[in-house]
Image: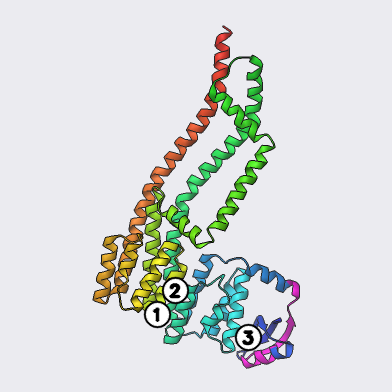
Amino acid sequence: MPRFEYIAIDSAKKTEKGTVTAENAFAARKHLRGRGLHPTDIKQVRMETTEKTVRGLLHRSSKKEVGSFTKELSTMLNAGIKLTEALNVLTLQVTNPAFRTAITEIRDKVVTGESFAESMAEYEQFFDLIYISMVRVGEVTGTLGPTLARMAAFMEKRQRLENKMTTMMIYPAVLMLVCVIVVIVIMIWVIPKITEQLVKTGQKLPFMTRLLMNISELLTSPWVLVVILGIVGLFLLYRRAVKTPKGALWRDKLILNLPGFGPLLKQQILQRFTSTLATLLGSGLSMAESLRVVSQVTGNVIMSDAIKQARERILSGSDISTPLRESGIIDPSTAHMVTVGEKSGELEQMLRMIAENLEASSDIVIERLSAIVEPVIIVFMAIIIGGIAYATLMPLFQYSVTQF
């Protein structure tokens, strides 16, 4: 449907600019008058602009921007501002063009009578299933403002935990990248010149030196393209395999069994599950519906299957903790706390307590891993660079000794 840019005057004689979706200019003017606006100028957005907007929608908005939007919207709604007015204000504050277009179109749909949740459901690149489910409950119960405030706090906590993991990995990743670049430069440009001189001496070269020369020749030969294509092919094969149920299950089992990182990832998956389930239950969503939503966004096949089994047991009148314990994701003590929360009717509070404990425990594990990983990578780099130096300098040293 065509979009129109407009300039209009509201009841307070203030000028307002924006965009509206309509079948034609006449329908757009009629729609604006229905909103209490008197359009002074209206023109259709060119196709070129629309195509750029569509391409922009293909890119996800930053989680930080969506979280900021949620927090500001909840503040306005709790202050008594109408939803359409709040959305109109936020369209002027959002910096991401694609996100701004999405909010504008959501506002237009809400004005025409569509529910806020259903309008957002068409923009899953910005709002996930948890977000939409909570908004839907907030609309039905008349607590949209507090629900969005709860969602904003949940997103902020989740983003903080993800940032900790990212921060922990940045320094080791940079060190590894520098090491790889240095080794490639040495092997391609430095080693060939040195080995050329070593071969001219006619002496028998050590095994390490011959190995280094062979690797250098491989990197500078056309066969390196075959190796690169092979690696790319294996990566594409892996990507295709993990899209299958068996492949995804194998990948998640492998990830959870990684030494050092496996227990941390298991804690984070469980923390995400407990905090998300507590947030959904706190918003008024039923247990069965909350488990359905969480099972689709957990990001781990093993946990997702366990949650689906828990949901089936809930529907048949059984408990939730047993299938989670059997999955291997949840430890016995945590499963016992969930059981106690179920029996006491305080499951939401118990889940929040578990999530907070897991977050604190994850912080400790992240600090310890950071303290271990960084020196290990430095030692690894030193061994690699030292090995290259030994393989190149040892023959030179032996040759110089034989000359005296």
- Closer to the camera: disc 3 or disc 2? 2
The answer to whether 402 is drawn above or below residue 387 in the figure is above
**Do the numbered discs 2 and 1 sit on residues whose CB atoms are within 8 Å?**
yes
**Is residue 38 within the magenta segment?**
yes
Q: Amino acid at mark 2?
A: Val
Q: Earlier in the sequence, mark 3 or mark 1?
A: 3
Q: Secondary structure at mark 3?
A: loop
Residue 278 in sight here: no
Magenta span has 323? no
Residue bearing the label numbered 2: 293
Q: Can residue 369 be spotted in the picture?
A: yes
> Residue 316 or 196: which is nearer the viewer?
316
Q: Nearer the viewer, residue 54 or 347?
A: 347
Tell me how far mark 3 sits from mark 2, CA to CA.
44 Å
**Which element type, helix, strand or loop, lies under badge 1?**
loop
Q: Which residue is mark 1?
A: 285
The image's colour scheme reads rainbow
Residue at the farthest top position: 404
Residue labelled with disc 3: 14
Q: Earlier in the sequence, mark 2 or mark 1?
A: 1
Question: Disc 3 or 2, which lies upstream in sequence?
Answer: 3
Residue 104 drawn at (x, y percent):
61, 78
Q: Position of residue 220 (x, y in %)?
A: 67, 34
Classify residue 75 as left or right of residue 57.
left
Q: Residue at x 44, y 73 (%)?
A: 293
Q: Position of residue 61 (x, y in %)?
A: 57, 67
Q: Residues within 10 Å of mark 3 (few under 14, many from 20)?
A: few
**Spatial CA span between label 3 and label 1:** 41 Å
